[in-house]
Amino acid sequence: MSVRRFVGANSRDVMRQVREALGEDALIVANRRTEGGVEILAMADEAVDHFEPSPSALPPSTSVSQVAFPPRDSDPLQVMSERLLREMQEMRELLSQRQSAAELPATEGYIAPQARLRQQLLSIGFSEELSDEVLAELPAALAQPEADSTLVMAWLRDQLMARLPVLKEENGFFDQAGIVALVGPTGVGKTTTTAKLAARFVMRHGTRPVALVTTDSFRIGAHEQLRIYARLLDTPMYALDTEQPIDELVGRLQGKQWVIIDTVGMSQRDQRVIEQIAQLQGGKASVRLVLLLNAASQPETLEEVVLRYRQAARAAGAELDDCIITKQDEAGRLAPVLDIVMRHGMRVLFGSYGQQVPEDMAVADPAALIDQALTAHPNQGKESHSFPAAGNSMGAQSVTLPRWSRDVLGQGRRLSSVLTRLRDRVVGFSALESVWDIASLPGVLQDKRLDALLVSVPCAGKGLGMAWFPRRNERGCDWTMPDVGIDADGGWLALTSLQHRQPAGWHTRLLHQGEAMGAAVHLLPVFPDPTTLAWLEDQHLTWITLVTAAQRVYCQGERYTQRQLFTDSPLSHHTDLRFRGQTMQLWSTYIKVEDAAGTPLLAWVGDVRDPENGKRIARRYWLTPARLGADVLSLLVIQLQSEGLSSLTKRAWQQLKEADNGEVSTEVRLLMASGIAATVGHLDAASDEASVALRSDLLRLLGTARKRRDTAMLDALVHAFMARDAIRQLSSVSREGLV
């Protein structure tokens, strides 16, 4: 199939011709305006590889015997399009050649340098995520088969070292007065490490400024072990009971400048971890937390330790960015612990590799640590697995960010700009961010924190009204769609209202939630009962309600169904709208009617039509107060646009559920999903210049083109939130003393 020419009166008409002839995936090669309208050259995507350009389109350097210049009567647009197609063919051939080279290992025993490096990193214990991230930056010169392996390994070593934050020198740690608490699971070496750190401090500053503290009242002999070290170092030792406030201890320290706390070891799955860290952070004194990681532990265990202890720290309003790697001498390979440290953006202060105090501990040296990891025998330990990417705050078994979402991490300025403008534009977006922050806390705290948030911002500010949804589960889901607020300009609010937190009955529901928000407009999914209708009319509130085609009303004394009422009625008025992610038109008309009680109403019928071919996509019926006249038309459009929020919420819900693995409260997840959907619906329906620019920047974060604008924006916003969390964690590492 060759390039085909299409001519139409306008762009919409000619694009319709292209779609009908070549399908949705047609390739637009060139376009221009002509006296008769618009001209487009297009072809089917699958025909590109079989395209044979005319001699006039070939470059002059092809050969002496070929035509070097186009004939005088040739069409410049045709020549340009053929050249573009030829370039596309060459690009596809190049990609095909690269793919063939990558497949050589299975056919000829050849392994490309990049694939070989990846194999090596995985075999010694680095994760797929980190390996792919590092090797994505491999220079083209080093990816060639003839590249010097020494240079390749030197480059790899430098890349890994650059990703390993460490303490620059001991003075950066020991010269800062304050309280340091070592935390971590049982048996990780906290007591021995406490003694080693205390000894290092004493060697620099003497015994007078230092004190040792233990909170371990569970393990037999724990106090005595630390007491022996304290006697050897000639330093005082104190015991802190599990329920004793940290401020009481500070009062007993008598001006000690440097205090180190040996905490009780707890499994990362023990809920008391939260209580322990909350106790350490509960006073006026600032306590610096340092997490101990056992280099000999399984990668899965280390991953869970980091996630759980960091969750507990965030729940207490603290940071946990520093770590000490212990038992290096017992580890068969060092790569797994370094991989986890790199992906979570933690800083390694020291490495511990024996029982001697204080000799068997040193400031973390990136070169030595990476060399030890790279020289591990490939058969040592189990094969590495894929673990969550850095900063994913959804729980221990979270799904990693997709590659394009990890790329968002490099777009910090754009991401920050997008989020800032969303806060300014979408009412309640800051509250949605607070809900997202709750999801990063331990599960036992999420519902309590959500209750407090909803009390402080029940509706994220006052709005124009509410779009109410039916009180039934969404199809295929075990939750009901939350109600969504409307701002003064008709846009959606980002913090939605959970239906199961509202009282039963439409009258009570509207009275309770509507008055709490100050809503003057109500978009109802069903015709209200007489009590509710009377209340709406008595309060002179603005309302519209969807009804079925079988809804009965009275017109000039006769009883009709809505369908019968509009059998012969032409639809004379139309307005544009966004419907289910597409630009459509609403054609409508209305008739004066009454209900059974004699309340004056307007009965409406509306067809949603495709503006290109006039095809009817959907038909809806409404009833509205007669006193409001035709001014309610804009509200009909808003309610139609609300129909897309349910499907967007389902999409976001599924993505979040896959990411959090059930560790996020159902209420929190539903508010996150519906809030993201409402934000996207807000942007999708807006047409001002600021919204167009904001949509463009949000979609650029996605990095790939999509057919549907609304779902593309939703995917981009979900993963922008994930990237925001990753950036926060990576940037929270203290900067003093970093290499």
Image (cartoon, helix red, strand yellow):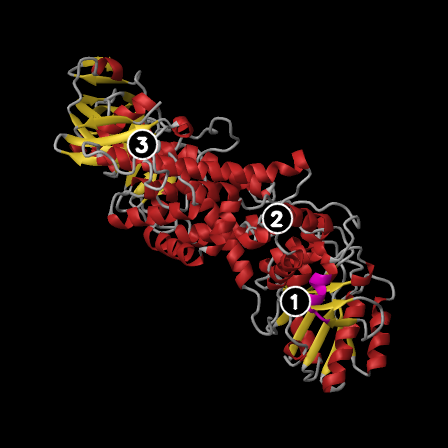
Closer to us: mark 1 or mark 2? 2
Q: CA distance from mark 1 to mark 3?
A: 72 Å
Which of the two discs, 1 and 2, labels the residue nearer the N terminus? 2
Quadrant of the rendering where the C terminus is positioned: bottom right
Question: Residue 734: image x %, image y %?
Answer: 57, 69
Determine the residue positioned at 30% across, 18% down: 551
Q: CA distance from mark 3 to mark 2?
A: 37 Å
Magenta-colored segment: predominant secondary structure:
helix
Instruction: Say whether disc 3 or disc 2 marks the residue closer to the N-terminus.
Output: 3
Q: Amino acid at mark 1?
A: Leu
Q: Amino acid at mark 2?
A: Pro
Bounds of the magenta segment = 363-371
Residue 579 appears anywhere in the view: no
Disc 3 target residue: 55
> Label 1 belongs to which residue?
289
- Pointer 1: residues within 10 angstroms few (<14), some, or many (20+)? many
Q: Amino acid at mark 3?
A: Pro
Image coordinates of residue 38 in percent, x first then y, are 19, 32
* SS under mark 3: helix
Dot 2 falls on a residue whose secondary structure is loop
73, 512: nearer the viewer: 73
